[in-house]
Image (cartoon, rainbow, N blue to C red):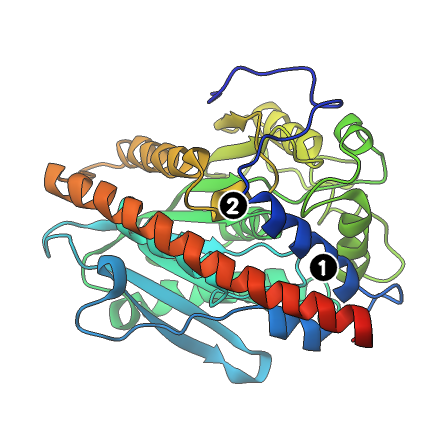
Amino acid sequence: MTLLHSSHQHKIARPSLPWTVRPFVSIISTLVDIACRPDGTANRRLIHFLDYQIPPNYNPRPTNSVSSADISLDATRNLWFRLYSPSLTSNNQLLPVLFFFHGGGFSFLTPASLAYDMVCRKFAFRLPAIVISVNYRLAPEHCYPSQYEDGFDVLKFIDENSATVLPKNADLSRCFLAGDSAGANLAHHVAVRACQTELRTMKMIGLISIQPFFGGEERTDSELQLVGSLLVSVPRADWCWKAFLPKGSNRDHGAANVSGPNAEDISGLDFPETMVVVGGFDPLKDWQMRYYEWLRKSGKEASLMEYPNMIHAFYVFPHLPEAFHLVMQIEKFIAKCSSKVPNSKFETSISQIQVSMFTDLIGSYVGVFQLYICLLICLFALLISVFYRM
């Protein structure tokens, strides 16, 4: 599906971004370049300074009608997840369970990061769903397969402890994996492992892959054409792969090039139906299209959602109409997958939709305000990094 008419002029055009977005992503791109040192290490002091964290809310009157709580699994490896529960649903309405893995090139951000707290809170309220946002170890301090192990361990923990951890209206027969960028890569590999493991209580019926971070040794047309892209560029992606992949391996490793020469055969697995989201100004889009085509060739159900005028990570900007549209498409995908589950009822009341539209309007303005607080922090950090080379 396509939101806007596709164009073949991407290699000479520039994304049409509002003034509220372009300066933010430009500054973030510059600061990411500074934080990623040439020797392969990350400037954690600068990264932590930039990463504005949102605490969970335990209040009886939850923010935006969604409560959240942080649950720790293993403090020795900082393995925890943030659980989001919407409060504007009846106690009798069973809700799907959505496991979400944040992006950041395997090297940055957490579930508490402002952008991802906003995204998961919106998912919980709009879909609606019980959302489990997973914190995993980061590269280069922890390389492959640490992130995959952490993601699957949270999945197993919920499978074995759902009765004591999740709300009573969590529907374990309708579980979904989701992620964006590196988180979508992680979600894919966790899905493969889940298919190879006998889960006790959960049934994975869908995978939502938002602009997944895949790659390879080959330079694709989109990587060559979209030089100097915002947020994600070929040099930044190469740095992330080098930080994440095992020493001595290249980008054709099965973790990066999932449809390449070292790809794992999933044709015999009960792999969940997958929704792949692609942005027209994302240099990774050719790898994402190959992923979609590979899923289809492997005999798996897959659908494609294209946003020709969007950059990588457009969905974290709540005031972009495409971000709102994407949430609606995810809601439709969940409803479609849920309709195939026997005795499943997936519905959103008219009153909740009306409240949701109003909340989204307010939330978009609040989100812009919060993002610009971060922008001021970023400007300050940029000045410090220039004068003191942190």
Looking at the rendered image, the quarter that the C terminus falls into is bottom right
Residue 42 visible at all: no
Left or right of 127 on screen, residue 277: right
Of mark 1 and mark 2, the one earlier in the sequence is 2
Report the Cα–Cα distance between label 1 and label 2.
Answer: 19 Å
Mark linked to residue 32: 1
The total number of labels drawn is 2
Tell me what residue is drawn at x 50 percent, y 54 percent. 197
Indicate the position of residue 165 as horizontal and vertical percent values. Answer: 30, 71
Which is closer to the viewer, label 1 or label 2?
2
Q: In terms of depth relative to the viewer, which is nearer, 236 or 161?
A: 236
Q: In terms of depth relative to the viewer, which is nearer, 256 or 139?
A: 139
Tell me what residue is drawn at x 71 percent, y 65 percent. 382
Q: In terms of depth relative to the viewer, which is nearer, 2 or 318?
A: 318
Left or right of 40 on screen, residue 240: left
For residue 141, above or below residue 282: below
Give neighbour class at mark 1: few <14, some 14-19, many 20+ (Cα, 10 Å).
some
Q: Label 1's element? A: helix
Indicate the position of residue 66 as horizontal and vertical percent values. Answer: 26, 60
Q: In terms of depth relative to the viewer, which is nearer, 331 or 382?
A: 382
Q: Label 2's element? A: loop
Tell me what residue is drawn at x 85 percent, y 40 percent. 217
Give neighbour class at mark 2: few <14, some 14-19, many 20+ (Cα, 10 Å).
some
User: What residue is pinned by disc 2?
Assistant: 20
Left or right of 261 on screen, residue 167: left
Amino acid found under the numbered disc labelled 2: Thr
Indicate the position of residue 277 as horizontal and vertical percent values. Answer: 53, 34
Amino acid found under the numbered disc labelled 1: Val
For residue 257, above or below residue 36: above
